[in-house]
Amino acid sequence: MTPAHAERGADPKSPLTTDRRCAPQLIHLDGRLLNGVPTQRTSLMKIQKRHRQPLRIMCADDNRELVELIAESLQFYGYRVEWAYDGKEALSTIAVEPEKFDLLITDMDMPHLDGYELVVQAQALGFRGKVIVFAGALSAQDRERFGALSVEAIIDKPANHRQLIGVVARLQTELWEQSNADAA
């Protein structure tokens, strides 16, 4: 008898199934089944690969150490990140190419332009990405105003930056799924 891994279920007394329909299908890197039968997954894999780009993120916060820590943490996870130390600087960067960014992470209280006005003006310029507000001590009124802008999340400071990264990862997955559905 050959080894069990070569002919699973070949032994009639074996508890392993001989029904090949139940066996997992192994896909070769080019999308074919290992036995050479082409699959529908080939085109789906190409679509998914094409739309699985890392998020492009703009972070705006007047706390220099915090925004740099957030940017470095996000970059560690493969995201492409730019940052600004106030709302006006962030808006200037977004204004050059509004479709460049998939996500804006902003503080509320910043010099020159607060987070709320940053979101309003960025959207007026054509920014269509998602928004996360990462701010301390927002009033109920501020929360309502951001809610009216359909921000994805409001994360209160002080928060562990891992919480922020978790929300970003969830948004990444949602954008990939949406992109794949649109392409199908």
Image (tube, grey):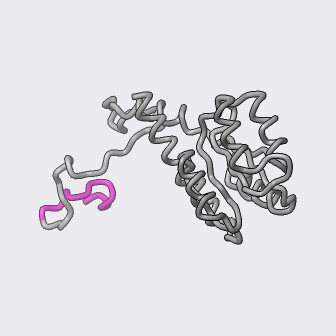
Residue farthest to the left? 12
Residue closest to the eye, 20 or 140: 140
Task: Write down the quadrant of residue 99 in the picture.
Answer: top right
Give the residue displayed 76% in from the left and 50% down from the top. 114
Residue farthest to the front? 141
Q: Report the magenta residues as a range.
A: 1-12
The C terminus: image quadrant: top left
Residue closest to the eye, 103 or 146: 146
Give the residue displayed 61% in from the left and 65% down from the top. 163
| Left or right: 83 in relation to 178 | right
Tell me where residue 108 appears, x and y as whole percent. Answer: 72, 56
Q: Identify the main secondary structure in magenta.
A: loop
Task: Write down the quadrant of residue 182 in the picture.
Answer: top left
Give the residue displayed 56% in from the left and 56% down from the top. 144
Residue 174 magenta-highlighted: no
The N terminus: image quadrant: bottom left
Task: Write down the quadrant of residue 158 in the picture.
Answer: bottom right
| Left or right: 60 in relation to 151 | right
> Is 49 drawn above or below residue 117 in the view shown?
above
Residue closest to the eye, 66 or 7: 66
